Amino acid sequence: MNTTTKKELCNVIARLAPVMDSAIKKYERHPSVEHSLTVLLEEVEELKQEVFKKNRVPSRIAAEALDVAFTAVRMVADNGI
């Protein structure tokens, strides 16, 4: 079986840092878990749009996927869950 390596995953996690820096500067703490879920669903929709574009761009898909990942992490952090 071909599995993703820990090193590959760590490299992707490292790519979250600029996403985190930007989001912290632009947006306040999520006030509730419901708010967090709404934001997460919006990010997933943006990712979906990028994935299904006729002429999709891998870097745009990656950027949207990183936004989804960070939003999920923020959901946990901002709501103390």
Image: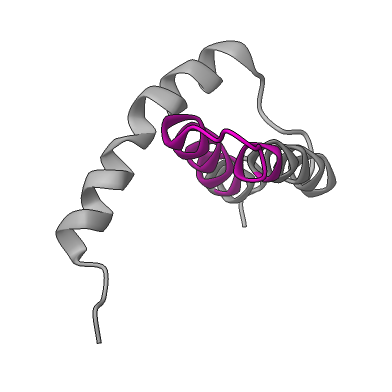
Residue 18 on image: x %, y %: 37, 23
**Taking 9 as reference, is 73 left or right?**
right
67 in the magenta segment: yes
Residue 8 on image: x %, y %: 21, 55
Residue 36 on image: x %, y %: 74, 42
Q: Residue at x 55, y 35 (%)?
A: 56
Quadrant of the image containing the N terminus: bottom left
| The residue stretch that appears in magenta | 48-72
> Which residue is at the far front?
54
Please say if 58 is above or below 11. above
Residue 45 on image: x %, y %: 75, 42
> Which residue is at the far top?
25
**Taking 12 as reference, is 68 left or right?**
right
Q: Residue at x 81, y 39 (%)?
A: 35
Question: Quick one: 29 or 43, which is closer to the camera?
Answer: 43
Magenta: main secondary structure equals: helix
Question: Quick one: 56 or 16, which is closer to the camera?
Answer: 56
Quadrant of the image containing the C terminus: bottom right
**Taking 38 as reference, is 63 left or right?**
left
Q: How many discs appear? A: 0
